[in-house]
Image (tube, grey):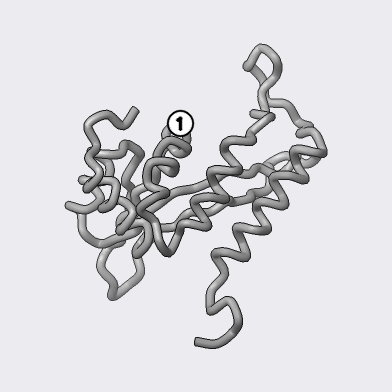
Amino acid sequence: MYEGITEIEWAQLATWLNSDGSISIQKSRPKRLGLTPIYRSRVAVSNTNRNVMDWLQTRFGGAVYLALRRPGHKPVLVWRCAAAERLALLKQALPYLIVKQDRASLAIRYEEAMTWNGKSEKGRRPSAIMPMVEQERREALYQQSLQLNRKGSVDGSY
């Protein structure tokens, strides 16, 4: 999947993830009542430099889009890793991460233990009911992600 990516490029990716990146497990509410929440891991980098975003997309795939603009600020671009590439990307970048290593490890655990994909056995229709054990597993990892990504210092001081 990532043939031709050098160790230096993996280290560069890790630098962007450590500084301007986000690695998290997110939860959203379904649009219809009665369905279980939707959980997904996310890997993204936000920056105002188009060259950085183009480099990320060219080397690591994914997509680049313009985030909501704020008056008086430069436009912010967001690179987001594609779902199909996320696990491989995190595993390759993990040894080079410093600040976000714990978040990446959690996202890897989330992706590796995925046991239910929300599709029927034939893969055609979404299933409304996620098994409770899977929902509890995803919720626990989501709560851990919230703790790792909360603002401020861990012990309340610097």
Residue at 30%, 58% in the rendered image: 15
Q: Is residue 79 left or right of residue 27?
A: left
Of residues 151 and 99, which is closer to you in this image? 99
Instruction: Give the percent coordinates (x, y) of residue 102.
Output: 52, 57
Between residue 9 and residue 44, name the one nearer to us: 9
Q: Quadrant of residue 45?
A: bottom left
In percent of width and height, residue 53 lies at 25, 50
- Judged from the image, the secondary structure of the residue bearing numbered disc 1 is helix
What is the crowding at mark 1: few (fewer than 14 residues within 10 Å), some, or many (at least 20)? few
Q: Position of residue 29 (x, y in %)?
A: 68, 48
Q: Decide if residue 123 is on the left or right side of residue 74.
A: right
Residue reaching furthest to the bottom: 157
Say above or below: 119 vs 59. Answer: above
Q: Residue at x 63, y 34 (%)?
A: 114
* Rendered residue at 43%/44% (across/down): 90
- Residue 1 sits above or below residue 66 on the image: above
Residue at x 31% of width, y 36% of height: 61
- Furthest toward the top, the residue is 122
Q: Quadrant of residue 17?
A: bottom left
Specify the amino acid type for callout 1: Ala
Q: Quadrant of residue 18?
A: bottom left
Residue pointed to by mark 1: 84
